Amino acid sequence: SISSSRGDTRRRREEGGIIDALHKVDQKLHHLRRVEAGYRKSIARARDDMKENTADPVKAEKKFKKTKAKYERKIEKLQPKIKQLTIRREELKGRHSAKG
C-alpha cells in the first residue's frame, strides 16, 4: 500500500508538475498582490487620519509622511518579487500551452 501511494505521487508529479507549479505561483502572486494592496490601503488610511486631525496639522503631516515612507519601502521590497513571479508564471504558461 505504501509503495503504490509513492508511485501515485510520482506519477502525479510527472503529469501535473507544470500545472501544480503554475497553481503555486498563482497563489503566491495573489497573496503578494493582496499584501501590496493592504500596504496601499494603510497609506490611504494614514492620509485620511491626517486630514481628520486638524488639532495639530504639522504633527499630523509629519506622522503621515513617516507612515507613508514605511509602507512605500515595504512596497518597493515587494514589487521585484511580484515581477519575478509574473515572469515565472508566463514561462510556465508557455510550457503548459506547448505541451497541450
Image (cartoon, rainbow, N blue to C red):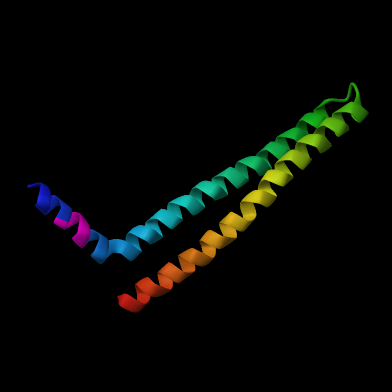
Classify residue 67 by image quadrant.
top right
What residue sits 71% from the left and 41% below the top?
71
- Identify the residue at the far bottom of this view: 98
Relative to 3, is 59 above or below?
above
* Left or right position of 13 against 2: right
Location of residue 43 in the rendering, given as x and y in whole percent from the top left corner: 72, 39
What residue sits 63% from the left and 54% below the top?
79
Location of residue 57 in the rendering, given as x and y in whole percent from the top left corner: 91, 28
* Number of residue marks: 0
Classify residue 100 by image quadrant.
bottom left
- Which range is magenta? 7-11
What residue sits 62% from the left and 50% below the top?
78
- Identify the residue at the far left of this view: 1
* 10 falls in the magenta region: yes
Relative to 49, is 25 above or below?
below
Relative to 15, is 44 above or below?
above
Location of residue 81 in the rendering, given as x and y in whole percent from the top left corner: 58, 55
Q: Nearer the viewer, residue 80 or 56?
A: 80
- Identify the residue at the far front of this view: 3
Q: Which of 1 and 30 is in front in this view?
A: 1
* Left or right position of 92 against 42: left
What residue sits 47% from the left and 51% below the top?
28
* 73 falls in the magenta region: no
Classify residue 42 by image quadrant.
top right
Location of residue 14 in the rendering, given as x and y in whole percent from the top left corner: 25, 65
Q: Main secondary structure of the magenta part?
A: helix
